[in-house]
Amino acid sequence: MKKITLVLSILCLCYLQNCLAATLIGHRGSFWGVESTSEAFINGAKFGFNGLETDIKVTSDTKFVCCHDDNLSRFGHSDAVIASSTLASLKALTMSQTRGGISYTGTICTLEEYLDICKQYNLFPLIELKWATGINTGDCSNIPALISVIQSKGMFEKAIFLTSMKACLEYIRKNYPTANMQFLCYDTTAETNLEWCITNKSHVDIGKGTGLTANVVKSYHDQGLLVNVWTINTIAEYLEYKSKGCDMFTTDSLDLSGILEPDDEVSFVSLWTKTMTDAPYLTNTTSQRSMAVYNSELYIPDMNNGKIAVVAGETGNLKRTIQTDLESTFLSCVRFTQDGVMLLGSTRNLKDTLSIYRCDQEGNTALLGKKTIDGFGLTDYFDVYGALNSANGGFIVAASNQGKAVKIPFQNGALGEPILFDGHKGSNISGTHAIVQSDSTFIITGVRSARKLYSIDGSWSKSFGAPTPATLAVDGDCFSLNGHDYYASVETRFGSFKLFDISHSIDSPVVFDNATAALGTTANTAITSPLCAEETPDYVTLYILATNNGIAAYRLQKKLVGVSSIEQAVPIFYVKDGIITIENATGKEVSVYDIMGRKLLSKSISSPLFSLEKLPQKQLYIIKIGQDVFKTVL
């Protein structure tokens, strides 16, 4: 047998350094050896795979062997049919296969030998049931004997049974209720098989393809089911399906050298909610139509009295009030530039004329610019990007109720000349907003207007794809966390919003979290519910105000963060030196599960800083803290 020890040792080092966040399964063992032979399995184990996959066939003397095909024709023996051959006769044959320009030889591997290798290297076996004698849709009579062998090797708890034959999995679930199962299907049938997987408590193994979307993965995750994908052999494929949320990757030889990726798991929690009674700074009119956050303080202008309520983002309590001298509708919108300049303004009732004021913390205001834009129309809202007083500058963008949009550049404390262009289609679209996504793009929203992404030069880029925000949604915000781009869409005027992951593109969004609870049911004729977000490296805090109903704060945070700077008592955990440390979860129940969903331990958290130790390392775990579920690798 030709060896590749040097190559394996180098690749194994790369794997150990870079791939602990991935659960990789060696397809038919690995690419290094005749497929599904002991050599392929051992080389896959040495390479660093977390599990080894094989197909099972049954010999004429009812022995279980590892082979994908019904015969050994591909390995040099066209007359060797497994079902009509004894194990001894098959073992006497030398199998050969050339892979990657290297010629290998080997002998057929028994189920027992395969399980011994998995046990020796502490890997889980992924056992695919192909149509075989007594293991098929019409006859499951040999499944008990198969499972008996697995039990005798002490590997039943680790083993995963994989097949596209539903009858076999139904038989296993009925007779072996604790068995770990994966249903094998193609990307085109993944959605239609979800209900069956839920009913039979089966995870899923889906063939790569365009039908395997992030939303399909999420639909399985929402039911507590893991998603494996096959067969992934390039870094580009791995990154594509990892970004879609897949949990396991079946591969022949995937080398992730140089791929150092952050954990992309985040959680979404509620921080506080204030009713109108709890927050006396809120009015029971439609005069508070905008909100901005800066340095963890919320700024809420009131068009009735020229005041701006400054609210603590951590608690939702009023800190102070700023009195301005501006007339009513100039306080319809508030925004902060990146260098901390507060901007107020709107077109007021002067069609085509957008006025922008700057305001300091004492309420002193100064007109920054009054821009007449022929054909623009009316707008109450604008958004900003960049630092007003810097040489690099930035821009203001706004969209009107006449289907137009405008960009106004700024630099060194002064506004430039406006650039008008067509925005959303149609006219008289109420509550239209322009929402900055990046230094080169922004989104336009409006009542019953499709969300669209534009470049700052005015060219249309993309429309929001399915799933889409609600028809009546008018406000939102864009932000990033942990390498993902998000759009928070206000779904109703009553203070509920939904999170979309738009990392793949706005035309291919993923619903990260369904709409939050409404803050009330009182009428809101302001045609908007202002929402704003404040980003930090470890979390994003989102605030929403619903006129006449209340105000609330939420947080999207990394599930795995270091020693956290989060001041709120939000349950978090982090991993260091193989120890899981949990903060801010006193009184909650913590449970730890392995990759197959088996509960390993459950404890009540008795202190603000709680540690879990002595768990085997280099394994994937599912951590449940109260109702929050996380994944991590030790």
Image (cartoon, grey):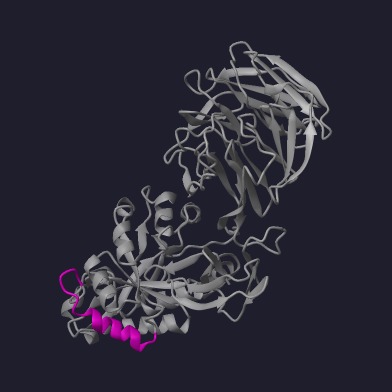
Q: Position of residue 222 (x, y in %)?
A: 43, 57
Residue 93 seen: no
In the rendered structure, the answer to whether residue 298 lies left or right of residue 174 reads right
Task: Classify the position of the N terminus by image quarter.
Answer: bottom left
The answer to whether residue 416 is above or below residue 272 is above
Magenta segment includes 146: yes
The answer to whether residue 384 is above or below residue 620 is above
Q: Position of residue 17 (x, y in %)?
A: 61, 68
Taking the view exactly as shown, the residue that stands out farthest to the top is 374
Q: Nearer the viewer, residue 446 or 80?
A: 446
Q: Residue at x 15, y 79 (%)?
A: 84
Q: Position of residue 565 (x, y in %)?
A: 72, 58
The answer to whether residue 576 is above or below residue 524 is below
Residue 447 seen: yes
In the rendered structure, the answer to whether residue 563 lies left or right of residue 493 reads right
The magenta-colored residue range is: 136-154
